[in-house]
Image: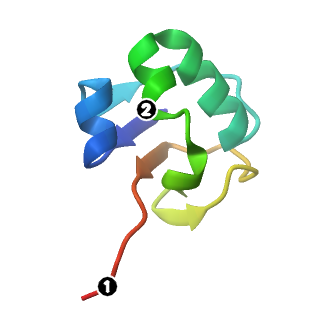
Amino acid sequence: MDVLYFAWLRERIGVPRERVDTAAATVRDLVAELSARSDWHAAALSDLSAVRVAVDQRLGDLDAPLPGAREVAFFPPMTGG
């Protein structure tokens, strides 16, 4: 699965994307796995109220299922303009 990071998440983690092998059933499970990878991941994903997620380019939430997903993106809340 490809995991993409945007804006300040990319800056804190240090990479724009990474390929991960995961058995995570939900985005919440994936966040726990990623947070265990490094202090950078843990810090970037520590306040999930400031993070939005998309699974296969569809907005979702932390309980979104991951089986069969090819891509998960994490990004800050969006504002219009």
Q: Secondary structure at mark 2?
A: helix
Residue 30 in percent (x, y) is at: 63, 31
Q: In front: 55, or 11?
A: 11
| Vertical placement of residue 41 versus 71, above or below | above
Q: In this orientation, does residue 67 appear?
A: no
Residue 12 in percent (x, y) is at: 30, 30
Q: Secondary structure at mark 1?
A: loop
Q: Circle 1 sits on which residue?
A: 80
| Vertical placement of residue 56 versus 20, above or below | below
Three-letter code for the amino acid on which mark 2 is drawn: Ala
| Separation of residues labelled 2 and 1 (CA atoms) | 23 Å
Q: In front: 65, or 16?
A: 16
Residue 21 in percent (x, y) is at: 55, 19
User: Image quadrant for the C terminus?
Assistant: bottom left
**Residue at image location 24% in from the left, 27% down from the top:** 15
Residue 13 in percent (x, y) is at: 32, 26
**Relative to 5, is 53 on the left or the right?**
right
Mark 2 in CB contact with mark 1 (< 8 angstroms)? no
Q: Earlier in the sequence, mark 2 or mark 1?
A: 2
**Residue at image location 54% in from the left, 66% down from the top:** 59
**Residue at image location 73% in from the left, 48% down from the top:** 65
Three-letter code for the amino acid on which mark 1 is drawn: Gly
Disc 1 crowd rating (10 Å Cα; few below 14, some 14-19, many 20+) is few
Q: In this orientation, does residue 18 appear?
A: yes
**Relative to 26, is 10 on the left or the right?**
left
The mark tally for this picture is 2
Disc 2 crowd rating (10 Å Cα; few below 14, some 14-19, many 20+) is many
**Relative to 9, is 47 on the left or the right?**
right
Spot the residue most to the bottom. 81
Q: Circle 2 sits on which residue?
A: 44
